[in-house]
Amino acid sequence: MGIDVGSASSKAVILDHNAHIVAAEVVQVGTGSTGPKRVIAAVLGKGGLKLDDIQKIVATGYGRFVIKEADRQISEISCHAKGIFHVIPTARVIIDIGGQDSKAIMLDKNGMVNQFFMSDKCAAGTGRFLDVMARVLEITIEELADYDSRATEPASISSTCTVFAESEVISQLANGTSKENIVAGIHQSVAARACGLARRGGIEPDVVMSGGVAQNEGVVRAISAALNQKVIVAPNPQIMGALGAALFAYEEVKKSDG
């Protein structure tokens, strides 16, 4: 089993003896909440398993040390790289945007991490940033991509601080700018920060996105346009870190089995 405990969500994946996914679950609350316990119970229930049936558990993510059941903790950089490369072996650049941070990871042709870059401790350009902006616009986070698709002239959202950007959005609304164009501007702002990280390591295809924000097609479009590069979204992008952790656990089981 692999468990990824982030700041905004908890994810878990169980693999069988052939490294196929038996069950995967996401609970939308992270470290410091009931999320870790709930995701373990949920993924075991989905797989029809008990904790005693699990041979090895690897935990990753910001809250990985709260998982008392884990046999080992491994960094989220290593686990995201492992999970993505397993499902997309052509990946060379990973852009992961989670609830409260973003990161860019560069892989070699064997899936090894060459370099990585992480955002500072700021919500700008993360899922939290999009949550705040959606609230100001009185739309749901799920509606952002649809609004973006109808934009005709993206608004300029220049602030890199969530608080100042919120003030910018309110000013844009007061000036009569459409929500569609504001959303597209917000997505361009998120893309600019993520692409800034990725460019520090050099852009090489394939570029793959993971993390909860990868489910927002508007952000994916904005990143693809900013990089002038096709961006592949990982299947079930929220669980890639947990999948990587599960693969590390799988390898340790195989090694111990001889």
Image (cartoon, rainbow, N blue to C red):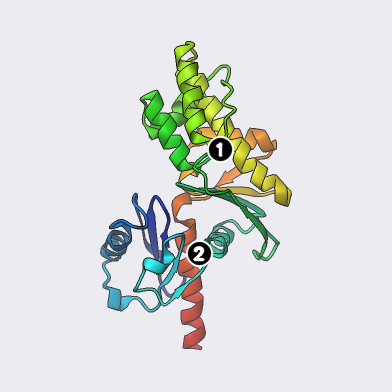
Q: How many marks?
A: 2
Q: Separation of disc 2 and disc 1 at Cα? A: 22 Å
Which residue occupies the foreground of this view, 189 or 12? 189
Residue 220 — which label?
Answer: 1
What's the residue type where badge 1 is placed? Val
Quarter of the rendering occupied by the N terminus: bottom left
Which quadrant of the figure has residue 2? bottom left
x and y, in percent, of residue 171 in the image: 48, 17
**Disc 1, SS:** helix
The residue under the point 68% across, 38% down is: 227
Classed neighbour count for the residue bearing mark 1: other residues with Cα under 10 Å, few (<14), some (14–19), many (≥20): many
Q: Is residue 209 above or below residue 131?
A: below
Report the side of 127 relative to 191 (left or right): left
Instruction: Tell me which label, 2 or 1, sits earlier in the chain.
Output: 1
Q: In this view, does 121 lie above or below 247?
A: above
x and y, in percent, of residue 179 in the image: 45, 19
x and y, in percent, of residue 253 in the image: 46, 80
- From the image, tell me which residue sits under label 2: 244
The residue furthest top is 176
Report the side of 228 relative to 75 (left or right): right
**Disc 2, SS:** helix
Which residue occupies the foreground of this view, 54 or 154? 154
Classed neighbour count for the residue bearing mark 2: other residues with Cα under 10 Å, few (<14), some (14–19), many (≥20): many
What's the residue type where badge 2 is placed? Gly
Residue 105 showing in the rendered view: no
